[in-house]
Amino acid sequence: MRKLKIGTRVYCLYKGNSVLEERVGYIGQTGFIIENLQDAKDYGNLEWSYNCYNKSWFTNSEKAKQKLKEIYKNLYGREGKILDCGTWFTIK
């Protein structure tokens, strides 16, 4: 994992079916807090642990999309299609 700085673009997995593009707002010892606190309130996750890198948050959108595909396939036993909606994407 590359060292995060305030403003670094990250891709955060929410509820196992959507990824939002966020920016790092605050950096701590064990994790970071996203810049957009409204997203944190709406989706229920404010702080992201460094231990969850490439599991629930990513610095590469393609890796985040691949994780969504894996989750979908494990749940439904078939491939899903990524829907790109600008600053977020989901799978159907």
Image: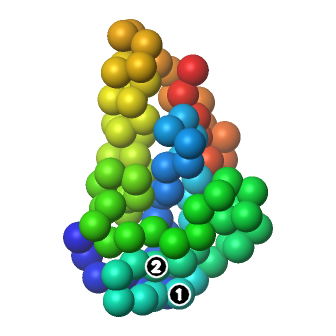
Q: Is residue 62 visible?
A: no
- Secondary element under disc 1, as helix, strand or loop, is strand
> Residue 32 shows which numbered tag?
2
* Alpha-carbon span between mark 1 and mark 2: 6 Å
Q: Residue 69's image quarter?
A: top left
Categorize mark 2 by other alpha carbons within 10 Å: few (<14), some (14-19), many (20+): many
The answer to whether residue 50 is left or right of residue 21 is left
The answer to whether residue 38 is left or right of residue 7 is right
User: Which of these two is toward me, 30 or 79?
Assistant: 30
* Dot 1 or dot 2, earlier in sequence: 1
User: Which of these two is toward me, 64 or 84?
Assistant: 64
User: Which of these two is toward me, 63 or 47?
Assistant: 47
Categorize mark 1 by other alpha carbons within 10 Å: few (<14), some (14-19), many (20+): some
Q: Residue at x 33, y 29 (%)?
A: 70
Q: Residue at x 35, y 89 (%)?
A: 29
Q: Residue furthest left?
A: 1
Tell me if residue 36 comes above or below residue 56 in the rendering: below
Q: Residue 75's image quarter?
A: top left
- Secondary element under disc 2, as helix, strand or loop, is strand
Residue 53 percent across, percent down from the top left = 31, 62
- Which residue is label 1 attached to? 26
Q: Amino acid at mark 2?
A: Phe
Q: Amino acid at mark 1?
A: Tyr
Q: Residue at x 70, y 73 (%)?
A: 37
Residue 52 percent across, percent down from the top left = 32, 61
Q: Residue 46's image quarter?
A: bottom right
- Label 1–label 2 contact, CB within 8 A: yes
